[in-house]
Structure formats: structure tokens, C-alpha cells
Amino acid sequence: MSISHLKIGRKIGLVLGGIVLTLAGLSALSLRGARTIGRLGKVPQVIQDVRPIVASIAAAIEEQATATKDIARNIAEASAGVNDSNTRVSETSQVSREIAKDIVGVDRAAGEMASGSDRIRTSAGALSTVAEALRATAGRFRA
């Protein structure tokens, strides 16, 4: 063989080797593609398997929303009760202030009555003295 035939043989070998490598790569891609297609074929089944889980999660979220609404309603009712209690305490406080004013007025009136009683006692004593003096004077006229 001549050198040119060797060169040609080498070139043909390189080309054939490249083709073999390309075919091997295509075979690997084809195998991967087949696996991918096989996996894609499982997607509907996975979706079917996941549906009950998603449905139970949705139901749990619905229950949580209902519970949250109930809690919010209870808090609103409790707040209204606290407001009602605050109103009653405020009204009671107002009534207590009015009672305290009335007690001060009664105390003042009692003080005035005591003062008036003292004046009446003093006046009664003076009147008794005048009555004694009148009796004595009248007794002198009779005698």
C-alpha cells in the first residue's frame, strides 16, 4: 500500500469513527428520549394520584377559613360585650358621682338642721328666761 492509500484509509477510519460516535450519541439521545417519553406518559397518572391530596388540602383550607371566620365573629362579639361593659361601668360611675353629690347635699342640710336646732335651743332658753321674768312680773301684780 502506498502512503496515499494509508492516508485515505485513515481518513475513512476517522470519518467512520465519527459516524459511529454520532450514531452512539444519537442512540443515547434516543434512549433518553424514550425514557423521557416514558416518564411523560406517567404524568397523567401522577396528576390522578395528586388530585386527592390537592382536594384534601383544599378542604383543610376551607375548614381553616371557616374556623378563622368563627374566631373573628367571636372576637367581634367579645369586643361588643366589652364595649357594653365599659358603657355600664361609665353609667355606674356617673350615678355614683350623682349619689356622692346628693350625700354632700344631705350632709350640708343635716349641718344646717343641727345649726338650726342649736339656734332653736338657744331661742327656747331665751324664751324660757323671758317666760320666767313674765311670771315673776305677773306674780307681783297679783300679790
Image (cartoon, helix red, strand yellow):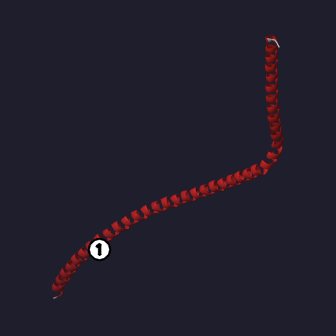
Relative image position of residue 75 (x, y in whole percent): 60, 56
Residues 1 and 115: in front is 1
Residue at point 20% right, 80% down?
A: 134
Relative image position of residue 122 (x, y in whole percent): 23, 74
Q: Is residue 140 left or right of residue 47?
A: left
Q: Residue furthest bottom?
A: 143
The quadrant in which residue 98 appears is: bottom left
The quadrant in which residue 141 appears is: bottom left
User: In the image, what residue type sits under mark 1?
Assistant: Ser
Residues 73 and 133: in front is 73
Residues 93 and 83: in front is 83
> On screen, 135 above or below 110?
below
Q: Is residue 24 left or right of residue 77?
A: right
The quadrant in which residue 30 appears is: top right
Residue at point 57% right, 59% down?
A: 81
Residues 132 and 17: in front is 17
Please tell me whether mark 1 sits on a helix, a strand or a loop: helix
Relative image position of residue 68 (x, y in whole percent): 65, 53
> On screen, 20 above or below 32?
above
Quarter the C terminus occupies: bottom left
Residue at point 31% right, 69% down?
A: 111
Residue at point 83% right, 36% down?
A: 34
| Residue at numbered disc 1 | 117
Relative image position of residue 3 (x, y in whole percent): 79, 12
